[in-house]
Image (tube, rainbow, N blue to C red):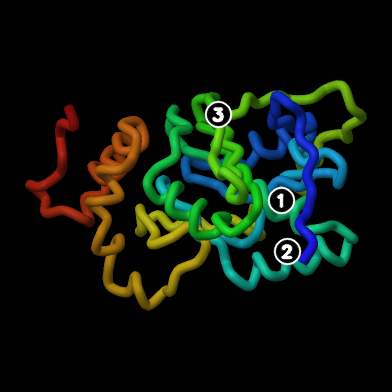
Amino acid sequence: MRRERVKLASKPVLRFSPTAWAKLLFFRDQQETEIGGFGVTAANDPLLVEEFVTVKQDVTVASVAFDDEAVADYFDAQVDLGRKPEQFGRRWLHTHPGNSPSPSGTDEETFQRVFGKCQWAVMFILARGGKSLARLQFNVGPCGHAAVPVEVDYSRPFGPSGRESWEIEYHANIKGRPDCFLADSYFGYQEDDLAGYSCPNDWMDELEAMEPEERQLVLAELSVRQDLWGESEVIDDFE
C-alpha cells in the first residue's frame, strides 16, 4: 500500500485565508458555545486553510457533537469535488467560548480517537477572547506533535465575505443544547444516553478537567438556572 507523501515547510505555520478566518470568527461569535468544523486546503499546501466547513452538530458551552450522517455526507461531497481526504479530513477546527484555547481532556481524547490513525493531523482551537492554539501531530515513524504558529495569509488571492451564506449554514448546522452542558463526545453520541439527565454521569470529571475560564463559564450558567436547584440552593459565590 503506497504511503502518502506530504511536503511541509521546515518551520510549519498553520495559515488561513482571510475569508476562511472571517467565517470562523463569524461562527465563533454567534453565541457563547463551542463550534466545530473542518479546514479544507489545496492539494499542494496542507497547512493553508482555504475554507472552514461545518456539519450538523449539537453544541454547548463545553462540547460539540457532530452528527455522524452529516460527517459522512461531508466526506462524500468533498470526494465528489475531486479532493483527497488529506485535504478536507485532517484539520479539526473548533472554538472555545472562554479566553483559553488550551485543549480539554475531552478534546485530547477526541483528537486521539478520531485522528489517531491518520498519518498526520492538526487540532486548532480558537478562544472567544482571541487566543488560539494549533498542534500538528504525526502518528507514523517516530511519532510526536508540536505546537505551530497561526497566521492569516493575505499574500494570496481571496474571496469576499459570504455573510448571507454563512448565516444560512449556521442556522442549518448549529443546534444549541442549553439544557445539556457537557456532551459524551464531540463526534456523535446516543440520545438515549442523555435521557433524563441534564448532563452525563461523569460530568464532574469533565468539569474538573476544564481550563479555569471555561469552568467559570459553565458554573456561571448553572448559577442562574434556578430550575436546576431548589430556591435556597442557587450558587452565590464561585471564588
Q: Earlier in the sequence, mark 2 or mark 1?
A: 1
Which residue is tagged 2? Answer: 74
Q: Residue at x 57, y 67 (%)?
A: 67
Measure the C-alpha gap from mark 2 to mark 1.
9 Å
Contact between labelled residues 1 and 2, with CB atoms less than 8 Å apart? yes
Q: Residue at x 43, y 60 (%)?
A: 185
Quadrant into which the C terminus falls: top left
Which residue is tagged 1? Answer: 53
Q: Amino acid at mark 1?
A: Val
Q: Residue at x 30, y 34 (%)?
A: 216
Secondary structure under the numbered disc 2 in the rendered image: helix
**Residue 60 in view in this figure:** no
Q: Is residue 198 left or right of residue 146?
A: left
Observer-nearest of 236 and 203: 203
Contact between labelled residues 3 and 2, with CB atoms less than 8 Å apart? no
Observer-nearest of 217 and 111: 111
Q: Earlier in the sequence, mark 1 or mark 3?
A: 1
The x, y position of residue 53, in whole percent, is 71, 50
Task: Give the vertical position of 97 relative to 149 (above or below).
Answer: below
Secondary structure under the numbered disc 3 in the rendered image: strand
Observer-nearest of 79 and 166: 79
The x, y position of residue 220, in whole percent, is 28, 38
Task: Give the vertical position of 107 relative to 117 (above or below).
Answer: above
Q: Amino acid at mark 3?
A: Ser
Farthest residue in the left direction?
A: 232
The crowding category of the residue bearing disc 3, from other C-alpha atoms within 10 Å (few below 14, some 14 to 19, many at least 20), is: some
The x, y position of residue 71, in whole percent, is 65, 65
Task: Give the vertical position of 14 relative to 118 (above or below).
Answer: above
Q: Amino acid at mark 2?
A: Tyr
